Image (cartoon, rainbow, N blue to C red):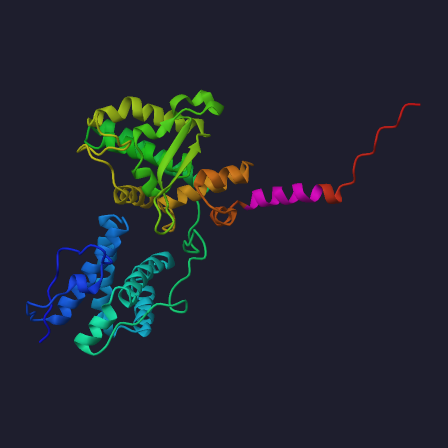
Amino acid sequence: MHILVLVVRVARGDLAGSAHLELVSGVAQLRPEDAMVDAMLSGWRAQQSARGLQERTMASRESQVRRFADFTNEYPWHWTPADVDEWSQWLTSERHLAPSSIRGQQAHLRLFSEYITDTRYGWAQTCEEAFGTFPVPITHEWNTIAHLNEYEGTPEARPFTRQEVQRFLDYADDQVDRAVRSKRKGALAAYRDATLFKVIYGWGLRRTETAKLDLNDWGRNPAAAEFGRYGMLHVRYGKSVRGQTPRRRNVPSIMGWAVEAVTDYVENIRPRFGGAEHPALWLTERGGRIKPVEINARFVAYREALELPSELTPHSLRHSYVTHLTEDGVDRRFIQEAVGHRSDSSTAIYTHVSSDFMNTALRKALTPAFDPAPPEPPKEP
């Protein structure tokens, strides 16, 4: 029986996460294989912690590795690339996960595989000495999904039409009136959500970006002084590139009706939630910050009540922002910066302009080529 135990201190000069720092002789383990896996995960956590990663990130990655181990019913030193093939196929055909979700899970698995096969950490040698075999790299370019673009939504995803947006926002406003007339609870929450959806559409935000907004994220824009303190929205939790912090961006306010809605909410509605010291823009009736899952639940309830297509999601409002501004002739570069895309190709994927717009644009492009230029006026003698 092999002797394994976890060590809680790291010696000076040793690489955080090294096998010899996690395992020493002295205590017998009834299940040495399980003890080895726990030691690997503990070492991986130490390695990530030394790089400054957040606790929730490390916990999420560890959870993913354990789920993969449960799927294979094998220990890491027995994993093969074929296991990743089978697992990825299962995520696609049985779990019906989006490519972006699968790629994220594969990335976590790749990081763990790279860690335990890196000779600097000594896990391969330790496993061979203990079990007669060692871990090998299991992810490669042929069995993982490449990150080809920032947007990887399903082909069915689409923006709202202008009529659908109007119906949706009108319905959200109607829920406030109904709650007030019936004198039932929920009027404040309904008003908050109606304003929240207007902000998603009016500033082209993602759901998580919206949930994490604070009151102080609004500021003045000298170029749009008429909007006062709501001329610019500072988005602090934009979508991040892997391994980096959230990307910040400033989104200029351009829809006056949306600014009016936010102004009314902040000045007249939000104070009624209490929690004056809380920084969040969107408060719950218990005084906390609203969560993305709550935004989604309210959206689905409204969508189903209106019998709108199921492919419409909160993210469709962001698509609508891009599409409708494009149809209105807003500069493409302005839209790209506002939504936080690194390349114009990503913005293009978000854009689904109407056929009327396409026909108008086509005619505008063809006119100079096919219409004869007007004759020049005769010159005076």
Q: Is residue 286 left or right of residue 308?
A: left
Magenta residue check for 261 = no
Q: Is residue 201 above or below residue 4?
A: above
Q: Is residue 69 above or below residue 308?
A: below
Q: Is residue 88 left or right of residue 122?
A: right
Residue at 30% x, 28% y is 215
Which image quarter holds the C terminus?
A: top right
The boundaries of the magenta stretch are 355-367
Q: Is residue 126 above or below residue 289?
A: below
Kindly give the residue lying farthest to the front in the view shown.
13
Task: Decide which of 259, 74 is in the foreground and name it.
Answer: 74
Residue at 11% x, 74% y is 2
**Residue 320 pos. (x, y %):** 45, 42
**Residue 143 pos. (x, y %):** 38, 68
Which image quarter holds the N terminus?
A: bottom left
Kindly give the residue lying farthest to the right in the view shown.
381
**Residue 303 pos. (x, y %):** 34, 44
> Quadrant of residue 86 in the image?
bottom left
- Asked whether the viewer can see residue 347, the reply is yes
Task: Decide which of 241, 216 is in the foreground and name it.
Answer: 241
- Asked whether the viewer can see residue 74, the reply is no
Task: Decide which of 296, 206 is in the foreground and name it.
Answer: 206
Magenta residue check for 360 = yes
> Quadrant of residue 18 in the image?
bottom left
> Quadrant of residue 191 in the image?
top left
